[in-house]
Image (cartoon, rainbow, N blue to C red):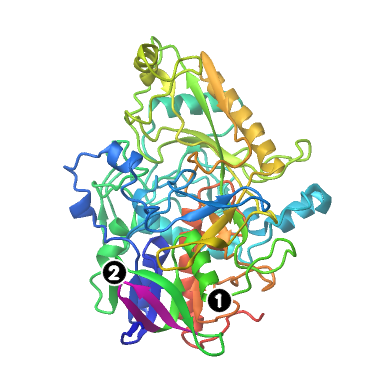
Amino acid sequence: MARRLPAKDAVIIGLGWTGSILAHELTDAGLDVVAIERGPWRDTATEYPPNYVQDELRYRIRHELFLRPEQTTLTFRNKMNQTALPMRSWGAFMPPNGVGGGGVHWNAETWRFMPSDFVLRSHLVQRYGEKFLPPDMTIQDWGVTYDELEPHYDRFEYLCGTSGTAGNVQGEIREGGNPFEGPRSRPYPTPAQKQPFSATLFAKAARERGYKPFPQPSGNLSEAYTNPLGVRMGPCSYCGFCEWFGCGNYSKASPQTTLLPVLVRKANFEGRDNCEVVRILLDASGKRATGVVYVDSSGEEWEQPAELVILSAYTLFNVQLLLLSGIGKPYDPDKNEGVIGRNFTHQTVSTVNGFFDPKKYIFNPFISSGSIGMCIDEFNGDNFDHGPHGFVGGGYMGQVQTNGRPIAATIVPPDVPAWGAKWKQSVRESYLSTVIPGTGVHGSFYSYRDNYLDLDPTYKDRFGRPLLRLTLDLHENELKMSEFLTDRFAEIIQQMGATQVVKHPRKGPYDGTEYQTTHLNGGAIMGTDPTTSAVNRYSQSWDVPNLFVTGASNYPQNAGYNPTGTLAALAFWSAKAIREQYLKSPGALVDA
């Protein structure tokens, strides 16, 4: 029997980017808020001080910052007729663990989705016709538009001090920025980072091929910055330890370096770490959440009553908690009915390795940051005519020099042995003169009827709850898109002067062991129809109005950009609706 605690105005499940944003906004509105986080407390000053030597083995290889499969895992299969088996180690993605969530270990690539991404199905049907889309594709419009989210994108970028070069300010296209981006209300708060040689050479080659390169928007700051909350951040030192690592220089935007220093000082906020929420409680009607039950590190069970419940865990665990709590109708792929688990997607990434003459080119890959580089957007979204190519979707591509770390950054030509004296010699010869793409191609991943999440019928976790089951595979549309975009990227690498170009387009079936990104999306998607979406345009549950579900689980499909900027904008958008509408008149904000 769970021990009952005093009630709170709001309980937040998960204290990553979205949980931190919602906690800050709701405490500012005067609510008494508690956030419950499964992982440990993480603090920049004590865990990642500037004099701390980053350990690639500890963080990149042994996954120090991530959820341990022995804590909880998932089962995976490609097809519905296969038996899913537990994942014993993380491969294609890395579930975060601890305060700050993925904001601790991310590369800080801070993108805005394009205006057409939010009305994707309507846009594609209008341009190409219904029959151009694969019959099993289940993409849909979001129910919210870019124009509505723009002020919240802006707020997140100024919270983070995002470094970049604006390409479209209030409809005015500006030289040097991304001409394809949606209009922004003002420029980035800090200028773009200085570019290394490889990115500069890529930009030159891209221009020679008729493209318009621009610096990647970066949460690794180009200069010292004080955000609107008064939190001070420092300039990036280009150490190359961003993705998979915490930043000790206060130069990478994270909840720890932007929000938490203010939040933890509030008397009406409490954070409880190393506590795992096991279910959301409902009243007898099943239409109102009454709080949550969680288990602390000693194994004791607690009930935390609350008037408002915010579910802001990682994508997979948002969906698992909804299913375990009986909230929303589980998705049935055979009938194509139900909403919880529907439209699960990932990201379609590919790379190109360019090998250059070491006597002419020295790239110094160790001088890098998580999101430093030059990109092009000519093949993102619907920026090009898809008609002749037989697929929809696209992605951004670029030479983003994220790291030159000695374990993972040992790229050699394909004809070199995988070990031994010849391999060592090739590593010595290739290290400084090889283009190691941190980005390469980041492509969209659209949703399909047979890609979904549900509860596994066989395997259970340490609490006796069913594990979440992933059914996921790449479809012909994404494979065609990946091959086409990879070829275009390779042409630019060749134009740079590479003596050998090795292409790695994404191939099927979906490989759960090869790392791609941690950008899992969907499963609790937003929309305008409660029969095809779990939450409304404000991320409010259609079924339980005092429950809001935030994060990338809201995405009906994944666009060609990384998801963090959009999930943060949606968090601010939801917080505004809660403060200005829900708290004044609790109940459904949109009629079902």
Q: Secondary structure at mark 1?
A: loop
Numbered tag placed on residue 263 in the rendering? 2
Residue 120 location, quadrant? bottom right
Q: Residues within 10 Å of mark 1 (few under 14, many from 20)?
A: some
Q: Quadrant of the N terminus?
A: bottom left
User: Could you say which is closer to the camera, residue 27 or residue 446?
Assistant: 446
Tell me the residue at 41%/41% (across/down): 371
Q: Could you tell me the amino acid type at mark 2?
A: Leu
The residue lying furthest to the top in this view is 359
In the picture of the structure, the residue carrying the numbered disc 1 is 326
User: Could you say which is closer to the camera, residue 240 or residue 288?
Assistant: 288
What x and y, as percent, mark residue 30? 34, 82
Q: From which residue to which does the magenta span run?
A: 289-305
In the displayed structure, 76 sits above or below 402; it is below
In the displayed structure, 179 sits above or below 545; it is above
Tell me the residue at 73%/40% (across/down): 385
Residue 176 included in the magenta stretch of the image: no
Say whether residue 227 is visible.
no
Tell me the residue at 34%/70% (across/down): 36
Disc nearer the start of the sequence (1/2): 2
* Magenta stretch, main secondary structure class: strand
Query: Is 470 displayed left or right of 137 in the figure?
Result: left
What x and y, as percent, mark residue 223? 29, 44
Contact (CB < 8 A) between labels 1 and 2?
no
User: Could you say which is closer to the camera, residue 83 or residue 510?
Assistant: 83
Q: Secondary structure at mark 2?
A: helix
What x and y, as percent, mark residue 437? 46, 31
Marks 1, 2: nearer the viewer: 1
Q: Residues within 10 Å of mark 2 (few under 14, many from 20)?
A: many
Numbered tag placed on residue 231 in the rendering? none
Residue 99 location, quadrant? bottom left
